Every structure is written in C-alpha cells, then in structure tokens.
Image (tube, rainbow, N blue to C red):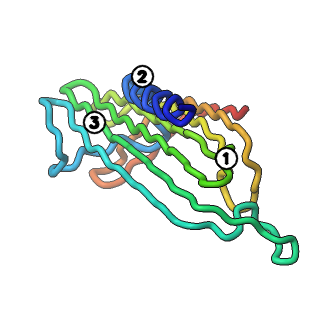
Amino acid sequence: MLHQKRFATGVAIVVVSIVMSAALRAQEAVTNPPADAPFLLGPLTLAPVIDSYIGHDDNLFNQSSSANPQGDITGTFSPMVNAWLTTARARANVRARSDLYYYGEFSDLSALDWNVDARIELPLNRLVPFVSSGLVKTNNSQNLEVDAYAGLMSTRYGVGTSIRLTSRISTEISVRRSQQD
C-alpha cells in the first residue's frame, strides 16, 4: 500500500510539473521543434520520451572491497516531455522530466526526482530578449564524487538577450541567479 501511495504521489508530481512548467526553462536557447515530433497541435509541439533501466548494482555505496560492499537490484523509470510553443511574436520551450528510482532491498533509497526547465523568447530583428528558469528536486546523488543520498532543491532564474551579429553568428548577454538548498 505504501508503494501505491508513492506511485500515486509520483504521478501527481509529474502531472503538476508538466502543467506548471509553462513559465520555466534553462539557459539554453530555444531550439526549433523537430519536424517529426509525434504531437503537433497548431503552434504547440510535444515530444514525449520514456527511459527505463533495470539492473544490479554490486556496490551501492561505493565502498572498498575490504569494507564488504552491498549490492541491490535497481530500476529507473524516467518519463520526459519536451514542448515548444511558436507564435508570431514569441517562442517558448519547456522540458519536464521525472525519475522514479527503485531499489529492491534498500527500499528507503527509492525516490522520485523531477526537473523542469523553461525559456521564453521574444524574437526581434537583431535582438532576442528572453527569460529562463529551472527547478530540480532530487533525493539521489548527483555525481560520482558525492555519494550522499540527500535531498536537493535547486532553482535557477535568468534574463538576457541574444544579439545576432551576422546571419550565422550571435552572442548572448545574460544575468543568472541560482540557489541550492
């Protein structure tokens, strides 16, 4: 029953993340949507992706072989959606991703992480002003250097402009702020 509640909470967070992500995006420029995207709804393009992994980790806590490392069956389920909204006066790109981590014996390490990024641009002649934002909430280690399984909430905000110098060259000036808790 506890797993059912966690799954229902995870699904609710994914849905809320996707719906609320319309005002968010990272520091990357808005790219044009792919021509072969599976869902085209007028000016809105959606490209959903689902990744999954099941395996066995022989050394969950990266301990030396003399410290009797512990292993477990692990699984990851990662739904993601990229969305592009292109109008005559503005462009927006949103990416929302959720990662559901499963551990067989070490069920207390199981977690639901999510990441939402958005960027809105106003294309003018040579200037393209933008605002961007991102939010990451995770309970897993983020890299191989830090093994801690601790909660992390990271927010990013930015404002700036891209300046087109020639038909193929542009530069970007921006101010960004990020915070990690």
**From what the image shows, is residue 163 above or below residue 22?**
below
* Distance (Cα) linking label 3 and label 1: 34 Å
Estimate the x, y position of residue 148 in percent, counting from the top left.
Answer: 76, 50
> Can you say which quadrant of the picture contains the C terminus?
top right
Of mark 2 and mark 3, the one earlier in the sequence is 2
30, 68: nearer the viewer: 68
- Disc 2 and disc 3 in contact, CB within 8 angstroms: no
Q: Mark 3 highlights which residue?
A: 84
Crowdedness near tag 1: few (<14), some (14–19) or many (≥20) residues, C-alpha within 10 Å: some
Report which residue position mark 2 lands on: 20
Q: Answer with mark 2 or mark 1, whichever residue precedes in sequence.
A: 2
Relative vertical location of residue 153 with respect to residue 78 in this rendering, above or below: above
- Whole-angstrom CA distance, mark 2 to mark 1, is 27 Å
Q: Which residue is at the front of the view, 128 or 88?
A: 88
When asked about the image quadrant of residue 108, the answer is top right
Can you name the residue that lies furthest to the bottom here?
Answer: 65
Mark 3–mark 1 contact, CB under 8 Å?
A: no
| Residue at image coords 34%, 36% | 93
Q: Quadrant of residue 63?
A: bottom right
The residue that mark 1 highlights is: 109
Quick check: can you spot residue 130? no
Q: The disc labelled 2 sits on which kind of residue?
A: Met
Dot in front, 3 or 1: 1
The residue at the point 34 percent across, 41 percent down is: 81
Q: Nearer the viewer, mark 2 or mark 3?
A: 2
